[in-house]
Image (cartoon, rainbow, N blue to C red):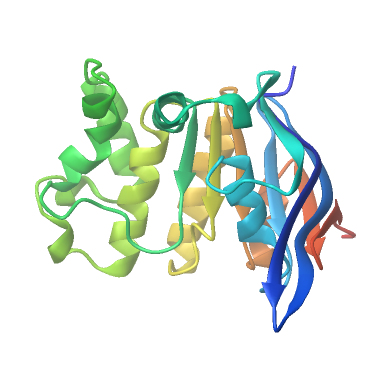
Amino acid sequence: MEYLCSEKLVKEYERRGKTFRAVDDVDIQINKGEFIIITGESGSGKTTLLNLLLGLTKPESGTVLFDGEDISTFDDKRLSEIRNEKIKYIPQGDSLLTSLTVRENILFPYVIGGKEEPPKERLIELAEKLGITDLLDVYPSELSGGEMRRVTIARAVINKPAVIIADEPTGNLDRDNTSKVMEIFKDISGEGTAVVVVTHQRETLDYASKVLNMSHGRLAPENR
């Protein structure tokens, strides 16, 4: 069974008095352990698709299924629980909590989930891979944009969710840190987590098990 999939998904918006489809009849299957990269021009519908898969936006028609259940039937509490424990989202921009240290930000999914913290080895391993070991006890205001991005990624993968959905996760990272992040995503997918990354960085495509292209709201296999 797919962890997450959509069937004939449509999302429409109004622009200058005319209706257009940001997502146009999209089917996607996101299976256990897959590493999917979605490419496409700005405005092609990539972020809208991610929002639909996360249940943040409701479609005009079509369905999004998580483990075979239609997420439109979930109440807010269940959607929040799933986003904290099962489907982790890495949005564009800064999403760290400024009142918490880097360590506390990374461990926050355990706090709001009412669960015990993971073994310290997990935190140390991620911090070392992402080059943030010396930043664990500082606050977000002391971080650069690239450092904040790496902390956000550590927070998303700390509890090994079923699915990770990331919107331009390496957009403000240099080549070395981009490689580190993509290697972590590849490792996570090898452990069974499905990973979906939207990116413009074509040098990252070789990390993926599947590459899709979005154009004018339509999703299709990428020709490489």
Res 215 → quadrant:
bottom right
Left or right of 91: which side holds 107? Answer: left
Between residue 60 and residue 150, name the one nearer to us.
Answer: 60
- Looking at the rendered image, the quarter that the N terminus falls into is top right
Please determine whether, in this image, residue 9 is positioned above or below residue 34.
Answer: below
Instruction: Residue at 74% x, 35% y: name it.
Output: 63
Give the mark count: 0
Residue 50 appears in view: yes
Left or right of 184: which side holds 145? Answer: left
Q: Residue furthest bottom?
A: 16
Between residue 103 and residue 87, name the one nearer to us.
Answer: 87
Please determine whether, in this image, residue 32 is positioned above or below residue 137.
Answer: above
Residue 5 locus on image (x, y percent): 73, 33
- Looking at the rendered image, the quarter that the C terminus falls into is bottom right
Res 11 → quadrant:
bottom right
Residue 221 appears in view: no
Res 84 → quadrant:
top left
Residue 150 locus on image (x, y percent): 35, 53
Residue 169 locus on image (x, y percent): 49, 57
Between residue 183 and residue 37, name the one nearer to us.
Answer: 37
Residue 196 locus on image (x, y percent): 63, 44
Left or right of 143: which side holds 59? Answer: right
Left or right of 184: which side holds 108? Answer: left
Please determine whether, in this image, residue 86 is positioned above or below residue 129.
Answer: above
Instruction: Residue at 45% x, 23% y: name it.
Output: 78
Instruction: Residue at 12% x, 55% y: name it.
Output: 139
